[in-house]
Image: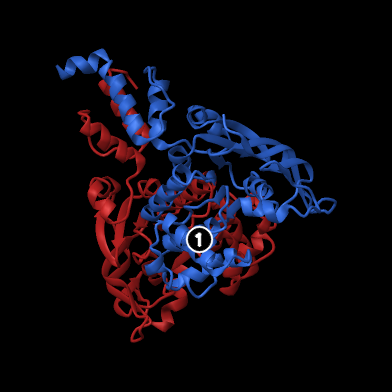
Chain colours: A red, B blue
Amino acid sequence: MSEPVPLIEVFHLTHVYHAGTPQEVRAVHDVSLTVHRAEFLALVGGNGSGKSTLAKHLNALLLPTEGRVVVDGLDTRDPQALWEIRRKVGMVFQNPDNQIVATVVEEDVAFGPENLGLPPEEIAQRVEEALRAVGMLEHRRREPHLLSGGQKQRVAIAGVLAMRPQCIVLDEATTMLDPEGRREVLRTAHRLREREGIAVVHITHNMEEAAQADRVVVLHEGRVALEGTPREVFRDVRRLRRLRLDLPEVAELSGCLRRRGIPVEGQPLDPGELAAQLLRWCGVVV
Amino acid sequence: MSDPVVVCEGLTHVYLRGTPFESVALRGVDLVVRRGECLGLVGPTGSGKSTLVQHFNGLLRPTEGRVWVDGVEIRPGTALVREVRRKVGLLFQYPEHQLFEATVFDDVAFGPRNLGLDPEEVQERVRESLQWVGLDPDRFGPRSPFSLSGGEMRRVAIAGVLAMRPQVLVLDEPTAGLDPEGRREILSRVRELHRKARLTVVLISHSMDDVARLCQRVVVLHRGQVFLDAPVREAFAQADRLRSIGLDVPRATDVLLRLKAAGLPVRCDRLTVEEVCEEIVRVLQGNQRWSSSEA
């Protein structure tokens, strides 16, 4: 893999809600973080750890109380840069029923490009590309409310894609979906990263999903508590428990096997990987 | 085998019948919930889970077929529904959105007050219910529900249902959207309510791990029909069938399924990480090659 190129840089970000009132809450405290081009970054942490607050700074939905956030060279505090930043970094939220505005799928996806004032042919082309990229082209004329949760979220992603973004932030976008819906959305996000080089920031409580990322950042009480590849981050069971998190089940099983004297190597995170290792010891060729 | 507390026979439910929006949510469902069991109800979105449980307490009436709750048949236009509703406590998804009183105490007291109970009885029920969900009544009672964490708010909502002293507790996705810690807390409270308070529990969940940890029996719905009704271990050993309708098996169990597919003599009806670990150790120790390399 080539040298990672920074796309979004967060410098010493602090965010305080209701500053100067009795309800004052310091949600994010001195966080520095880089999102690289074309990387899949998982952002995890317990409820109240500051994940969503941090995410909303990535496209200037929130502005720093202290510190700064720079998106592809643009400072989010610069009002002139606001729309350009929102075009570069799109967000998909938790509830699939709250983010669709139109009564036909393709009109919903066209909403953003229309606001950019693009010519109709360009809009039509972008909508088609975006729907194809999320595997929803055949549903282009359907009514959004008749779609499944996973399909609705993919339409929301298409709406972001039609803006030709450089980064998509999934703010717990899989939380309300069933297992199939989750897989659909994640498969789509991974494909966009590979084929289009779009960076993905995936905020989730699901450690199995985090295990599939290139890099995991763990937030705890508004600070970065751990950061690394999934294998590095999921090595330390006790630490994760203290941070109110779980291990992916396969990592937990590997730890259990090691304690029983079976020398599981590395940090398998996927059932296939662990099974293959066990089979090799048994002399079964796989 | 204990006696049935909810019985559905040939239950069919059609929404908006006779309109262009008509949709069949349940077709011919036969199901028995037995007293004291913890039943997992799983299935993809739109499979009919929520429609089904709303028949358990008379919120919906069958289009066709019959439903009995604690021996009483639910029929349209009967006056018995109120009694039935009290027997079956239903906790909807994201119940914290339905909290509305100024204090936790008042929120939990809302149901019992509506029953016209005297203040001491209300007080006793609220304290007891909050204790069951692990919230100290003296500390949490006077607080605003909106000052609590997501997991705590959800426990307050469960306490509100418990304060009605139901026999059956139906929980629709009780851990959705909670962090792992909040999820563990809710699950251990539900386990206690089942084991110690001897409540009958119906757990609706997308999480096969939750079902594996809590339930003895699992009913899988698919397109409004019962796709599978089996003890939890037997159900998860049928991974291919579950996957064919988009459901998961626990990831640890998945490791066993792969070992078995490669020809190792493992049993796949192991669900928790500890059980799966034990099974792998057993099989590896029996494996000649591994034992000799150890020696």
**Measuring 27% from the left and 69% from the top, which residue is drawn there?**
A31
Q: Relative to residue B276, is residue A119 drawn left or right?
A: right
Task: Measuring from the top left, give residue B196's x and y in whole percent.
Answer: 44, 44
Residue extending farthest right? B18
**Does residue A141 appear anywhere in the picture?**
no
Task: Measuring from the top left, give residue A286's x and y in whole percent.
Answer: 35, 22
Q: Relative to residue B156, is residue B15 drawn left or right?
A: right
Q: Which residue is mark 1?
A: B125
How packed is label 1: few (under 14 Cα within 10 Å), some, or many (20 or more)? many
Residue extending farthest top? B288
**Measuring 20% from the left and 28% from the top, which residue is drawn there?**
A261
Task: Measuring from the top left, give residue B207's x and y in whole percent.
Answer: 48, 44
**Measuring 21% from the left and 33% from the top, which residue is drawn there?**
A259
Q: Relative to residue B126, is residue A99 drawn left or right?
A: right
Quadrant assignment, res A220 = bottom left
**Measuring 56% from the left and 73% from the top, which residue is drawn there?**
A116
